[in-house]
Amino acid sequence: MKTIARRLLTPLLAALFVAGAAAAETPTPANRLVGHWSLVSVAIGGQKPYGADPQGSMFFDVAGHYAVVVIGVGGAGAIAYFGEYTLDEATGALSLHVDASNRAGAAGRDEKRLAQLDGDALTLRSARASGGLGGVTLVWKRAD
């Protein structure tokens, strides 16, 4: 009887394992963020302060942590910050909690971005800041 049960259960368990693995591999916006991203462009209020070939990297991990580094060019200063992120998959709203930054007063803030994934491209947009330079648009490409 045990042999019959093993013969029946082994293929069933194998099928369940394969189905579970396939479901886990289904790309969702949240798991598509995970990895290394390379900066393509930065626009702030219609200007390109980091020039035509900006240098930067952004990392997201599966545990909800991120890190961003953008190298300063010309008059634009370098930016580095890291913390935890969440993504509302229904709206594309990306929330970045800043644990630490090279910018004064940035630590402890929550930054909101609208994330749009298109293949290996990720566009992050912020809302227009009242009295500020205007909306920020960053375009990243998958680097890993």
Image (spheres, helix red, strand yellow):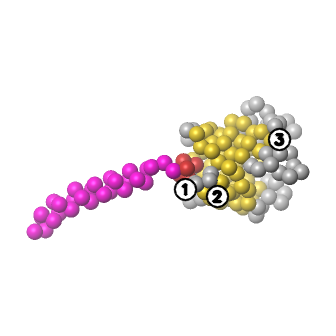
Q: Amino acid at mark 1?
A: Val
**Among the 4 quarters of the image, the one containing residue 5:** bottom left
Q: Residue at x 21, y 62 (%)?
A: 9
- Residue 76 seen in render: yes
Label whose residue precedes the other's in the sequence (1 or 2): 1
Name the outermost residue toward the left: 1
Numbered label attached to residue 45: 3
Tag 1 residue: 62
Q: Quadrant of the C terminus?
A: top right
CA–CA distance in space, label 1 to label 2: 10 Å
Tag 2 residue: 85
Q: Residue at x 33, y 53 (%)?
A: 18
Foreground: disc 3 or disc 1: 3
Start-end of magenta stretch: 1-28
Q: Residue at x 43, y 54 (%)?
A: 24
CA–CA distance in space, label 3 to label 1: 32 Å
